[in-house]
Amino acid sequence: MILITDPLRARLLANGAAEADIDHFPVVKLFDPTGAATWLLTELDADGDTLFGLCDLGFSFPELGSVSLAELASVKGPLGLGIERDLHFQARFTLSVYAEAARICRHITDAERLLRQAADALSKPHSELPSGTAEQQRR
């Protein structure tokens, strides 16, 4: 499977060339079909290899960071399957919302309720958030 098609590459490169403080919508979702790893990617550097986004390797600690497209393309799982692109993924929120929801539930999620809660939490000034909000959400 082609992980990044030409139209996706163009969008990722445009986001990568944009101002640094823009909260982009994820352009592509990649995943390991034999494991728990998932990536929501928003940007591609001009080098054509360094992707940026929300990375979840399945260890309950999703984080924003960079990953090599060449490395992702070279991965072969235990059944010989490589990383795949979610052909049906349509981002409904910006990357910061997905990151907040992932922080709360400890993995990348597309659960509408959790994403809306994360969006609502991010829209409030920090002083309005009750203490322990994230801890309550995990229970």
Image (cartoon, rainbow, N blue to C red):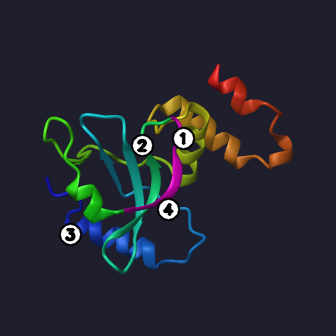
Q: Residue furthest top?
A: 139
Q: Which mark is residue 61?
A: 1
**Do tag 3 and tag 4 residues touch (Cβ < 8 Å)?**
no
> How far apart in space, not on screen, are marks 1 and 3 (Cα)?
31 Å
> How far apart in space, not on screen, are marks 1 and 4 (Cα)?
21 Å
Q: Amino acid at mark 4?
A: His
Residue pictured at 71% horizontal, 28% vertical: 135
x and y percent of residue 32 in the render?
Answer: 28, 41
Q: Identify which residue, 6 or 2, lies in the foreground.
A: 2
Q: Is residue 64 magenta?
A: yes
* Disc 2 target residue: 57
* Disc 4 target residue: 24
Specify whether 109 is left or right of 116.
Answer: left
Residue pictured at 23% horizontal, 51% vertical: 75
> How far apart in space, not on screen, are marks 3 and 4 (Cα)?
19 Å
Crowding at dot 2, Cα within 10 Å, few <14 / some 14-19 / many 20+, comes out as some
Q: Which of the two marks, 1 or 4, is nearer to us in this view? A: 1
> How far apart in space, not on screen, are marks 4 and 2 (Cα)?
21 Å
Q: Which of the two marks, 2 or 3, is nearer to us in this view? A: 2
Mark earlier in primary sequence (3, 4): 3
Q: Amino acid at mark 1?
A: Phe
Mark 4 residue element: loop
Residue pictured at 47% horizontal, 36% vertical: 59
Magenta-tinted stretch: 60-67
Q: Is residue 89 magenta?
A: no
Q: Is residue 134 above or below residue 95?
A: above
Crowding at dot 1, Cα within 10 Å, few <14 / some 14-19 / many 20+, comes out as some
Mark earlier in primary sequence (1, 3): 3
